[in-house]
Image (spheres, coloured by chain):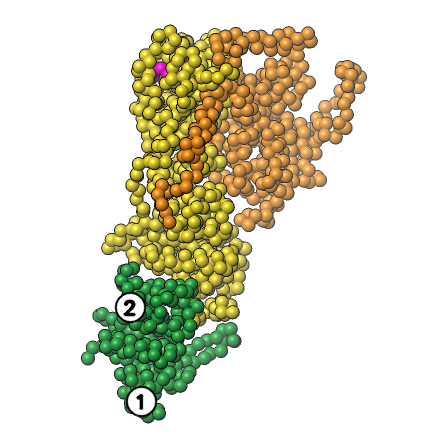
């Protein structure tokens, strides 16, 4: 079997809050996890179990204390925890999509430009990027009249769709999703979920956090249940979620 | 051994010898001084257009009354020579008369008013209309030898500009002249480029005479007595009046003018008195034309009639192709970074590296306990790749701007190295380069945008002129091409083109900053350094400038360093960031990581403040 | 005519010269002898020697007489005379500590080494016109005071600076900047950036009024380069002149000359300066001219500290010579109708361009449409 796109081992993360007398807040206590190409791994668990922290440690928005995060692109696996900042920034731009519940668009920029900028980072030229961005926005039903409007004035649902479009345009090798559809109405939510599913079919490795167990059952190849910062179960959705339900 | 007796008999004997050698004739310059003058003249001939310093002696005429020209004439003249002296083209002017009397009375040369018979012609403000040949030496009296004086008041700076052939200020002044007045208004003493190297002041003669200097048969010597300079244009030397490739040089002209004495219309004419009309400035020529003793056909061929002013030609110049520098060709040994800063430090005060122990974040002070020096920055390391933006954040006094100043060369670094990928494939430490080469790097390799637009712009010249400064420094010589490039850049930074010809001083702060950015990008440098680019601007204006910068960085393969105390600016523009405190880098990382997971207590405080 | 336009220029010049000679040399008044001028106008003679850079009282006196008392013109005459003379020898360096003082004041210390010697000065004399009727002073009946025997210590007192040096209160700049061989401004023009010796030599020869004016500008003007200066010492006295014997090569004293010397003490307060110490500026010129050397000493220290940050060095080197500034000013009286015609033509060309609709601020700045 091919090596996983993402292999997390013994990952630990604790925050030291110097502004509050150095208080330490523990988050992850040794997480092990694999995601293969074409696999959709859903992270489940109670609030505070470490789901978002894990995604952020993979994306390097958080620096893990110890453990390893390996990503295989083409060739040898790359250790992300020790990767120089510049290489990590490049890897993010080309190979990793990260979609959170919050919009990461630069201020005073319209949806088309925001999505096209991501596409350009993933190797498209100016014109191709615009076309790809337009296609992504269409697919997520973002009204064309909004494409050049400052993202800051969009509704929560619209922003989330722009965010998804940016994360999935010119599909990356690894897609990290953190509650990407929480603010969507049923119709748009359906469009978003089918988009994610189609990416998995295109061999993208997806590691996702969905609030809704139904979504996980429908979309996930595997579900990993986190509790108190460690993996408590890892298996087929029915196995893991069925037991939890 | 010191002999303390007063015994000057040997000296007296020596003096007597000298008196005898000098003979009976009154001298006004001793032989030793003449030799010095000749040495300076030889140097001047060897380096055409270069102002050679010489130990100018006091002459019996006031400095300003031809003391320099007189020394040159006395230095080069001999018994076989025939001298002609003119002032304003006139042999009979009081100054000319006086000098002729002095030269004739103290040398054995003959005197004449006929240019054809003369071998040495000392002149103030004119070249004779008569043809000059290899037998002629023109000696000009020069009041102000420095052609750059009008654009630069510091003589040290003028010296540097000549040494480095850095004449962009001169070009900008021509550019501004055309923009403001529709033509180049420089009148007499028009600046010329000699032998493709030095810019030189033409003494001052009228523009009418300037074409006579190009590939001349005769030797031109310029003597500036008060300023103690001699310079020369040897025969067969290229002399080009400074003007843009597509804006013609123009000589003096008045429609339908002719000499009311001799009828000539192809000579330099001066006002002819209270009843109007014009007369020849060259009285010898005028007389000979009237007497039928002048070759007026050959003269007409010499006359600069092809360079009479023509308003239509000024603004429809021919196209000149110019190169935009910038994009460096990358080869196998080009490093992946465009700028690499290693172990850079700056200590203000005494002690150098010895002042460093006991300073920094752990000690809570930048002041050296041992020497009292201020350690503004120490041991700062980073590199930036093309297409990447790096942030430097910290409170004021943290040393971030000091680091930038050291990289730019505004402040000499105490230690460390700075390398540019485009310079010698990154092998050369640019801090060790001579100032001249560092300044050249600022033209097309590394640009800065300062917090204060006045630091990066000349507020008294137009927006277009500020951009023209960078372009002319990079060698651009086409007026219309420069205009078009400036317009493109101003358009890109959203400065209305209707303001292109307004002095930057009349611009708002945000608009000035946009002009500064346009100038910085004019030659597409590989490295862009931004020092608090939006600090001091109103929030809405600052937001506009940040958006502009973000767009500009995204569309270019430029390596940028952004210095700011404001996390919002850093977050909007950069991928990676260094956090500085009390002169040291205390933390570094991906910008979003530093914002969401700061480790150092200082960074956590900065982030907490930014979130507020 | 005669000014420039026609023949006859020479006759006009000769007539003007003749008028000067008649009025000056043949005025119905007693001839002013060289001795009268050197003895009665000592300070004017000294000033001319200083500004001319030539120490010879009879020459300076003759120049003053010919210049009808205009010291700047007199300095010009002396320097032009100097230009006709060969250089026979270079004098040997002289140590100012050899100065035999005629006058010496140490304002900064109550009891310095050696005397506070007032000497010949009117500093403390009321400025009242003594003989407005123009009558000569009556013969002096009082006997000439007995010359006081002076010890070596009194003739050549230790300078105040030595004491400050002993107290380690002075920054030592000696030997800095590779300025060991003094810059000869009569052979190599001094322009910024220049060695200290070049600036000192320029000031020593500067026009007194120009230097005092520049000094006062540094106190009250926009630059403020002179701060808390204390005058350490001012001296007037005699120094020996030595040259190498042309045959033996040994130093020989061939005469002596009077100089005025001053040292000014400046408080150091700059960020890069040693604030625990003082710095010293130096002034020296030919003849007796205290105003000039005090200004010079102050400006020396100001130039060391701020000369290159602002305009001071350029001002000192290029604007204080009386012959330079006076000569350039005088040259404005020469005809300039060729250059003026050239200027008029450009004004007319600007108007013609405007009339033809091709003047400044064409509507289309780049020669084509830009959005």
SS at badge 2: helix
Mark 2 surroundings: few (<14), some (14-19) or many (≥20) residues within 10 A? some
Is the residue B573 above or below the residue C125 in the image? below
Residue bearing the label numbered 1:
A240
Q: Is residue C123 magenta?
A: no
Say if residue A212 shows up in the picture: yes
- The chain coloured orange carries which letter? C
Residue C251, x across and y down, in percent: 51, 24
Q: In front: B115, or A151?
A: A151
Residue B567, x across and y down, in percent: 46, 64
Residue B570, x across and y down, in percent: 43, 62
Chain of the residue where label 2 is placed in the rendered structure: A
Question: Label 2 vs label 1: CA separation?
Answer: 36 Å
Residue drawn at x 51%, y 19% as measured from the top left: C334
Colour in which chain B is shown? yellow
Is the residue B535 above or below the residue B128 in the image? below
Residue drawn at x 62%, y 19% as measured from the top left: C70
Which quadrant of the view contains residue B148?
top left
- The chain coloured green carries which letter? A
Residue bearing the label numbered 2:
A135
Q: Main secondary structure of the magenta part?
A: loop
Residue range in magenta is: B128-132
Q: In front: C36, or C256?
A: C36
């Amino acid at each position: 079997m091919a090596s996983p796109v993402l292999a997390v081992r013994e990952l630990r993360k604790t925050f030291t809050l110097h502004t509050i007398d150095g208080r330490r807040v523990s988050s992850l206590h040794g997480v092990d996890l694999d995601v293969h190409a074409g696999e959709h791994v859903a992270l489940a668990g109670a609030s505070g179990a470490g789901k978002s922290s894990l995604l952020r440690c993979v994306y390097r928005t958080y620096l893990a204390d110890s453990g390893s995060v390996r990503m295989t692109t083409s060739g040898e696996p790359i250790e992300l925890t020790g990767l120089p900042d510049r290489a990590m920034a490049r890897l993010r731009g080309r190979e990793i999509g990260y979609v959170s519940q919050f919009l990461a668009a630069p201020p005073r920029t319209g949806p088309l430009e925001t999505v096209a900028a991501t596409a350009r980072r993933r190797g498209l030229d100016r014109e191709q990027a615009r076309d790809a961005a337009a296609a992504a926005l269409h697919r997520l039903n973002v009204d064309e009249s909004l494409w050049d409007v400052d993202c800051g004035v969009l509704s929560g649902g619209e922003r989330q769709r722009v965010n998804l479009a940016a994360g999935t345009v010119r599909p990356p090798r690894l897609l990290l999703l953190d509650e990407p559809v929480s603010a969507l109405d049923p119709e748009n939510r359906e469009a978003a979920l089918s988009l994610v599913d189609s990416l998995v079919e295109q061999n993208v490795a997806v590691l996702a956090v969905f609030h809704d167990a139904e979504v996980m059952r429908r979309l996930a190849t595997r579900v990993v249940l986190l509790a108190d910062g460690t993996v408590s179960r890892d298996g087929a959705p029915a196995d893991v979620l069925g037991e939890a339900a | 051994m010191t002999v303390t007796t007063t015994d000057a008999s040997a000296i007296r004997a020596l003096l007597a010898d000298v008196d005898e050698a000098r003979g009976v004739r009154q001298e006004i310059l001793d032989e030793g001084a003449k030799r010095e003058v000749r040495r300076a003249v030889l140097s001047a001939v060897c380096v055409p257009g270069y102002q050679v310093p010489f130990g100018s002696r006091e002459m019996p005429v006031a400095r300003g009354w031809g003391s320099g020209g007189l020394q040159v004439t006395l230095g080069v003249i001999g018994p076989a020579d025939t001298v002609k002296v003119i002032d304003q083209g006139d042999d009979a002017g009081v100054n000319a008369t006086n000098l002729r009397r002095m030269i004739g009375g103290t040398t054995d040369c003959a005197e004449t008013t006929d240019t054809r018979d003369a071998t040495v012609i000392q002149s103030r403000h004119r070249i004779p209309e008569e043809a000059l040949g290899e037998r002629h030496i023109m000696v000009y009296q020069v009041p102000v030898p420095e052609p750059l004086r009008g654009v630069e008041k510091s003589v040290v700076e003028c010296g540097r500009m000549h040494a480095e052939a850095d004449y962009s200020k001169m070009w900008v002044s021509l550019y501004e002249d055309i923009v403001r007045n529709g033509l180049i208004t420089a009148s007499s003493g028009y600046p010329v480029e000699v032998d493709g190297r030095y810019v030189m002041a033409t003494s001052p003669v009228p523009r009418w005479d300037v074409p006579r200097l190009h590939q001349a048969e005769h030797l031109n010597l310029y003597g500036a007595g008060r300023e103690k300079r001699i310079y020369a244009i040897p025969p067969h030397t290229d002399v080009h009046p400074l003007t843009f490739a597509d804006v013609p040089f123009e000589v003096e002209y008045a429609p339908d003018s002719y000499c009311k004495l001799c009828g000539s219309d192809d000579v330099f004419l001066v006002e002819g008195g209270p009843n109007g009309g014009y007369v020849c400035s060259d009285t010898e020529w005028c007389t000979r034309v009237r007497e039928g003793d002048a070759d007026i056909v050959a003269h007409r061929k010499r006359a600069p009639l092809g360079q009479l002013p023509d308003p239509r030609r000024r603004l429809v110049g021919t196209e000149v192709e110019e190169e935009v520098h910038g994009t460096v060709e990358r080869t196998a040994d080009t490093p992946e970074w465009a700028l690499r800063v290693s172990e850079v430090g700056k200590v203000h005060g005494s002690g150098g590296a010895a002042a460093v122990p006991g300073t920094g974040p752990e000690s809570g002070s930048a002041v050296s306990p041992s020497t009292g020096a201020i350690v503004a920055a120490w041991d700062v390391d980073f590199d930036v790749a093309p297409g990447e933006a790096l942030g430097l954040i910290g409170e004021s006094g943290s040393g971030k701007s000091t680091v930038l100043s050291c990289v730019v060369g505004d402040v000499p670094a105490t230690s460390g190295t700075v390398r540019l990928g485009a310079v010698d494939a990154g092998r050369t430490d640019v801090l060790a380069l001579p100032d001249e080469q560092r300044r050249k790097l600022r033209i097309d390799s590394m640009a800065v945008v300062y917090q204060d637009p006045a630091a990066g712009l000349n507020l008294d010249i137009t927006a277009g002129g500020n951009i023209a400064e960078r372009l002319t420094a990079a060698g651009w010589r086409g007026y219309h091409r420069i205009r078009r490039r400036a317009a493109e850049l101003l358009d890109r930074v959203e400065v209305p083109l209707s303001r292109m010809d307004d002095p930057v001083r009349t611009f708002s702060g945000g608009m000035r900053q946009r002009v500064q950015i346009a100038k910085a990008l004019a030659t597409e440098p590989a490295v862009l350094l931004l020092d608090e680019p939006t600090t001091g601007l109103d929030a809405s204006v600052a937001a506009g400038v940040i958006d502009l910068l973000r767009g500009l960085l995204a569309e270019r393969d430029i390596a940028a360093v952004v210095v700011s105390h404001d996390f919002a600016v850093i977050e909007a523009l950069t991928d990676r960031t260094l956090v500085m405190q009390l002169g040291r880098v205390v933390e570094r990382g991906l910008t979003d990581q530093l914002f969401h997971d700061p480790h150092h207590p200082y960074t956590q405080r900065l982030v907490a403040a930014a979130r507020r | 005519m005669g000014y420039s336009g026609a023949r006859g220029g020479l006759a006009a010049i000769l007539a003007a010269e003749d008028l000067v000679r008649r009025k000056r040399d043949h005025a119905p008044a007693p001839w002013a002898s060289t001795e009268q001028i050197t003895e009665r106008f000592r300070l004017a003679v000294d000033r001319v020697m200083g500004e001319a850079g030539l120490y010879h009282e009879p020459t300076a006196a003759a120049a003053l007489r010919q210049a009808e008392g205009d010291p700047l013109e007199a300095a010009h005459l002396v320097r032009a005379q100097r230009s006709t003379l060969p250089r026979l020898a270079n004098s040997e360096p002289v140590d100012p500590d050899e100065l035999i003082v005629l006058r010496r004041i140490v304002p900064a210390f109550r009891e310095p080494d050696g005397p506070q010697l007032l000497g010949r000065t009117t500093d403390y004399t009321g400025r009242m016109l003594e003989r407005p009727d123009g009558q000569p002073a009556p013969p002096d009946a009082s006997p000439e005071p007995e010359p006081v025997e002076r010890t070596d210590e009194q003739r050549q007192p230790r300078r105040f600076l030595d004491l400050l040096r002993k107290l380690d209160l002075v920054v030592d700049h000696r030997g800095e900047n590779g300025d060991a061989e003094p810059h000869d401004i009569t052979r190599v023009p001094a322009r910024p950036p220049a060695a200290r010796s070049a600036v000192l030599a320029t000031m020593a020869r500067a026009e007194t009024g120009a230097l005092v004016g520049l000094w006062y500008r540094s106190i009250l003007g926009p630059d403020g380069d002179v701060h808390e200066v204390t005058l350490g010492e001012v001296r007037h006295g005699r120094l020996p002149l030595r040259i190498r014997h042309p045959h033996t090569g040994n130093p020989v004293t061939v005469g002596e000359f009077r100089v005025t010397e001053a040292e000014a003490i400046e408080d150091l307060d700059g960020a890069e300066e040693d604030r625990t110490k003082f710095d010293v500026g130096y002034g020296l010129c030919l003849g007796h001219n205290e105003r000039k050397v005090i200004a010079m000493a102050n400006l020396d220290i100001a130039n060391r500290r701020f000369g290159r940050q602002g305009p001071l060095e350029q001002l000192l080197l290029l604007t204080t010579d009386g012959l330079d500034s006076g000569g350039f000013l005088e040259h404005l009286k020469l005809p300039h109708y060729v250059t003026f015609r050239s200027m008029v033509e450009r004004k007319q060309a600007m108007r013609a361009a405007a009339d033809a609709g091709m003047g400044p601020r064409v509507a289309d700045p780049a020669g084509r449409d830009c959005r």
